[in-house]
Image (cartoon, rainbow, N blue to C red):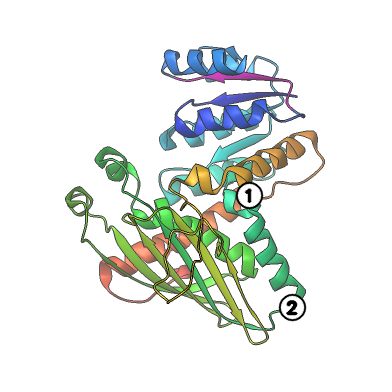
Amino acid sequence: MRIGILGLGRIGAFHAETLSGLDAVDSLVLTDPFADAAKAAAERFGADVVDSPEALLAAGVDGIVVAAATDAHPALILAGVEAGVPVFCEKPVARTMAEGVEVLKAVRGRDVPIQIGYNRRFDTGFVGARAAVQSGELGKLHTVRSTTLDPAPPPAAYIAASGGIFRDCSVHDFDIIRWVTGREVTEVYAVGGNRGAEYIKEAGDADTTGAILTLDDGTIAVVSNSRHNARGYDVRMEIHGFQDSIAVGLEDKLPLRSVEPGVTFPAGTPHDFFMDRFTAAYRAELTAFTEVVAGTRPSPCTIEDALEAGWIADACTLSLREHRPVTIEEVRQA
């Protein structure tokens, strides 16, 4: 099949590399507002280059991957749907939830699949955790802990346009909690602090946050996030049930060290980047998209899924600002 990629920044170029190695993909078509970025990627991967999204959609593509700036996501999703071409789009659907809702309304009832990029759903550890929950081997759940700690904060310009740590970072935890447990979040309480980069505070954001989520069956989920974790990129989950407890990310590249005498775990070099931690997951995610394009599976992460994670992020943002619990229904838009 022939896949188009719109946006050849860091993640777009990474997707181009991944797609070029998939057996199902015969050729790539690339476009980016910065022509040099598209040209460099095309030379590297033997792809064709066009000068606009319109030209890309007219180039005989079977599916498109949207890796452009967030502000461009709605228009590019809708352009793909209008052309009848399956769409993979990196999160978020749109800059704001209101815009995301408008995208959902515009594509509802259209027979064109859309997959939103939440790669943790394709990580083998999280897949195993979901299977353990679904099998019932853990018993009823009572506690979930989810962690995302970045080794260093992104640049100030990125922070200013990110929508805040809950929408940019924590949203991955919110999505994977929903996916692994199969439950919905009903209420949140969030706290945050600023003890690191001053430009994050100046942007009105927090660099370290904690959130307590109440799920619809009474399970408590605790989410911990930070822009500052000098030891590496730390993504983990614990799931505790009445019959057993399991963990995701408890492996030799875990960026954590034990001070217990004689303990040598973890023994590997810590993960230091999300592409390192999730290389295999990204490949599985894009493999799934080729199956969506081929019509052999439904979208594994829909716009509706992405918006549900977004409502949780909005609720946490409001909770932090107003220092109170916030229900999801309080922030949800019809």
Compared to residue 188, the image places residue 300 above or below, namely: above
Give the label on residue 136, or none. 2
| Residue 11 percent across, percent down from the top left | 49, 34
Mark 2 touches mark 1? (CB < 8 Å): no
Query: Which residue is nearer to you in this view: 264 or 326?
Result: 264
Compared to residue 250, the image places residue 115 above or below, namely: above
Give the label on residue 288, or none. none
Image quadrant in which you'd find residue 10 = top left
Name the residue beneath numbered marker 1.
Answer: 302
The label nearer to you, 2 versus 1, is: 2
SS majority, magenta = strand
Is 10 situated left or right of 282 in this image? left
Segment colored magenta: 25-32
Residue furthest front as drawn: 262
Q: What residue is at 31 percent from the left and 62 percent from the top?
A: 208
Q: What residue is at 41 percent from the left and 17 percent from the top?
A: 34
Q: Which quadrant does the N terminus fall into?
A: top right
Is 88 situated left or right of 203 in this image? right
Tag 1's secondary structure? loop
Query: Which residue is nearer to you in this view: 273 or 93?
Result: 273
Specify which label sits upstream in the sequence, 2 or 1: 2
| Residue 115 percent across, percent down from the top left | 63, 43
